[in-house]
Image (spheres, rainbow, N blue to C red):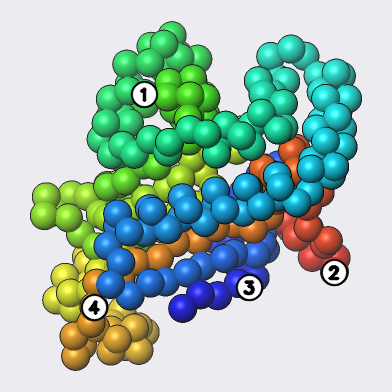
Amino acid sequence: VYTFGPTFRAENSNTSRHLAEFWMIEPEVAFNDLNDNMDLAEDFIRYVIKYTLENCADDLKFLEQRLIDEEKNKPQAERSEMALLEKLNFVLENNFIRISYTEAIEILKNSKPNKNKKFQYLIEEWGADLQSEHERYLVEKHFKSPVILFDYPAKIKAFYMRLNEDGQTVRAMDILFPGIGEIVGGSQREERLDVLIEKMNALGIPEEELWWYLDTRRFGTAIHSGFGLGFERLVLFVTGMTNIRDVIPFPRTPQNAEF
């Protein structure tokens, strides 16, 4: 099954990459584990970008020139390292590197920007929530390819994500792209009723409020996984626009509901 519809952000994020209301493509696939989920998300994004390159070449050339002209007014340090078409081909031509959150934390901890205190948010210990600067460092500087991070700490992810055997991490995954950081977030879902109830109790989530969700597990269910792809963030990436408010007809941002 899949849904494509409006989504509302819980956090009060007011940046050039965030909207208070945006559109999300969300597939959910029976019998898919986390690896299948990563395969589907990677194939999906590659297909859309390849289709756009093949069918909208003139538009993309125009958008590439627009970006070059816009960036002439920026300081060198703030300009994109890659032209638009180069960036799109970068995604198609490079294998998506898959690494665990734990490996990523080690790389970031030992990275020059972290040691030289150049990151705005320094990485000091396992369990830290990664920021856009960390995600972009992994993609643009360390691996020089799109990256899929998986097996995140349970404490920084949603309660419905499947708990790993270590009891510390969950079967979550994020796809990171150059320029924007996270473009897809998803997970294998917790199909075991007892584990789900235990996690809800630990987080203080009342069972009676989610009785309908627990009922989908109560009589047994299949392994299943899904992900969310922010539509405007994908449009932002493919068009080379620099502000997400330029790729949606009526941008809804925190404290703003004019339309």
Residue 6, picture quadrant: bottom right
Residue 256 percent location from the top left of the image = 78, 59
Q: CA distance from mark 1 to mark 3?
A: 35 Å
Whether residues under marks 3 and 4 lie with C-beta atoms below 8 angstroms apart, the answer is no
What residue is disc 3 on?
Answer: 5
- At x 41%, y 11%, the residue is 112
Three-letter code for the amino acid on which mark 1 is drawn: Leu
What residue is disc 2 on?
Answer: 259
- At x 75%, y 43%, the residue is 239
- At x 43%, y 36%, the residue is 95
Residue 50 percent location from the top left of the image = 62, 47
Residue 194 percent location from the top left of the image = 14, 76
| Pointer 3 or 2: first along the chain | 3
Instruction: Classify 10 Å Cα crowding around label 3: few (below 14), some (14-19), many (20 and above).
Output: few
What residue is disc 4 on?
Answer: 222
52 vs 82, nearest the viewer: 52
